[in-house]
Every structure is written in C-alpha cells, then in structure tokens.
Image: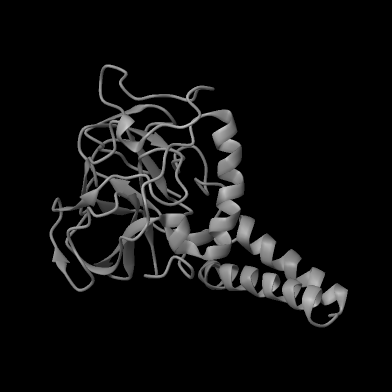
Amino acid sequence: MAVVLARIRMPLIYLGLAAIAVDSFLVDLPRWPLLALLAVAFAVYLRLGTVRRPPVEVAPPVTGRWLAYNSPADRVPSHHLHAYGQTYAIDLVSDPAGGRRPGLAWWPLARRPSDFPGFGQPVLAPADATVVRAHDAERDHWSRTSPPAMLYLVAEGTVRELLGPGRILGNHLVLDLGDGVYAALAHLRRGSLRVRPGDRVAAGQQLAACGNSGNSTEPHLHFQLMDHPSVLLAAGLPLRFGQAGLPGNLEALAGAQVRSPQP
C-alpha cells in the first residue's frame, strides 16, 4: 500500500491543481468532489507512504567533515514530506574544522555560493551503478541564509513545485544501483557533472561537485534512496552509510560515515 500511495501522491496533487484551474477559468465543477479530491491528495502528499524495510548500505557520497541536516535519525519523513521519494533523505553540509562556514544571520541578506566550504566539493558514487538521469541546466543561486531570504525561499519553493521536480532538485543525478534501488544526488554545481545517462560508474568515483541549485538554502548535497527512477513516482527507501551510527542534527560526520536507523 505504501508503494501505491507513493506512486499516486504527486499525480493527485497535479490533478487537484488542474481541477482548480478548470473550475476557476473554464467551467464550474461540483465543489464537494473537488474538495474531497484535494483533501485526499494533500493527506497522501503530507503523511502517507512510508516504506519499511531493512536499510540499504551504500558508500558515503562525500569525504571530509560534514553535518547531517534533516536526517532520518531525527524524524521520518526526514524532510517532513514523503513527496519526491524523500522519506529517508539526508542533507549533507560541509563543515570543515575551524568554523569557516557562514551561519544564519540578518546580514548579508544572501551570500555567493563560493562563500561556503561545500561549494565545489567532490560528490562521489555511493555504489557501482548505472546513470539513468543527469540534469545540469540550473544556475547556482545565492544563499537563503538570512530571515528575509528564508521567507523568500518559501515563495520560491511554491513556484518551483508548480514547475516540477527538476526545479526542486536543481542539477541532479539519478543512479540505478540494481535490485530496484535508485539513488538521487541533488543540488549539484552547474557544469560539474562528469557522467551522462547510460554511463557505468564505480563506487567512490567522482560524479559531480556540490552546488547550490534548486530548492536549496546553501551549498549542500541532498542524498536519498528510492524504488523508482522518477522522483515524481518514487517511494523513499531507508539507507545506511558505512560503519558509524548516524548522529543527530548539527553533529559532525567524521569522514561522512553515517547510518540511518532501522525503520
């Protein structure tokens, strides 16, 4: 049932939006069926569709000292939503020793991507895999790391939702790891992709560089496993990185060797 719900959640949302447009501009539709459709669509979008199975172990997609934000160690779904296969997704933010990473502040309102240590850092293949999708057309925008910029991000994210998952993920790769498991690596730097669909890659091979494209507050790597190559239809899968346990939010990942909890 969880997989079925995962497959229909985004089509239901788009169907509901289309029904609103038809009702507003073309013909009057019966209101109760329309409201029922929207209620079901948002219920599925927000809360339903957790796949529970043993985690899939993969190699860390980064090296160095990184922080785990929005991880399944803190909550499931980790990003508050099951949509786009991100039930067990994790955001990895580079934070080298010495405190060189800018934090949230009122000023400046935004920073260049290059002000952050993660920008341009290598992104590695988490396993031997085949590239099934490679998107490299989105710009790397300035950060959203001030309160006014965070408010702007909310409005910006709504527009990105309407434009489709590609605008949410920004530059991204989808890899086929075999056995029905796919990996998505998102918010990559424009022009950094070293592979294209159909390429075979080996675990640890550099695929791209960390960027700040798509729905992103600052340069970081969004990583997730899922059961379908399309994030529009995928259900998120639990994952494990290497040998160490996954720390909570804001804890350092030494060598990014992290693991998600059993679902």
Lateral position of residue 49 relative to residue 88, left or right: right
User: In which quadrant of the rendered view does residue 12 lie?
Assistant: bottom right
* Colour mapping: one colour
Q: Position of residue 122 (x, y in %)?
A: 20, 44
Residue in the foreground of this view, choosing between 177 and 167 = 167
Compared with 180, 59 (above or below) is: above
Position of residue 55 measured from the top left corner of the image (x, y, whole percent): 35, 53
Q: Position of residue 148 (x, y in %)?
A: 59, 32
Q: Nearer the viewer, residue 184 or 213?
A: 213
Residue at 28% over, 31% down: 117
Q: Is residue 213 left or right of residue 176?
A: right
State left or right for residue 99 relative to residue 12: left
Dividing the image into 4 quarters, which one contains the N terminus?
bottom right
Question: Is residue 121 positioned above or below 251 on the image?
Answer: below
Numbered label tally:
0
> Does residue 116 appear in the picture of this structure?
no
Q: Residue at x 26, y 25 (%)?
A: 96
The single residue placed furthest to the top in the displayed view is 98
Residue at 37% from the left image edge and 52% from the top image edge = 139
> Would you place residue 77 above or below residue 149 in this image?
below
User: In the displayed image of the protein, which residue is found farthest to the bottom?
Assistant: 27
Do we see residue 180 in this rendering?
Answer: yes
At 32% across and 45% down in the image, what residue appears?
211
Q: Viewed as shown, does residue 239 lie left or right of 50?
A: left
Q: Estimate the x, y position of residue 258 in percent, counting from the top left.
A: 30, 39
Name the image quarter holding residue 10.
Answer: bottom right
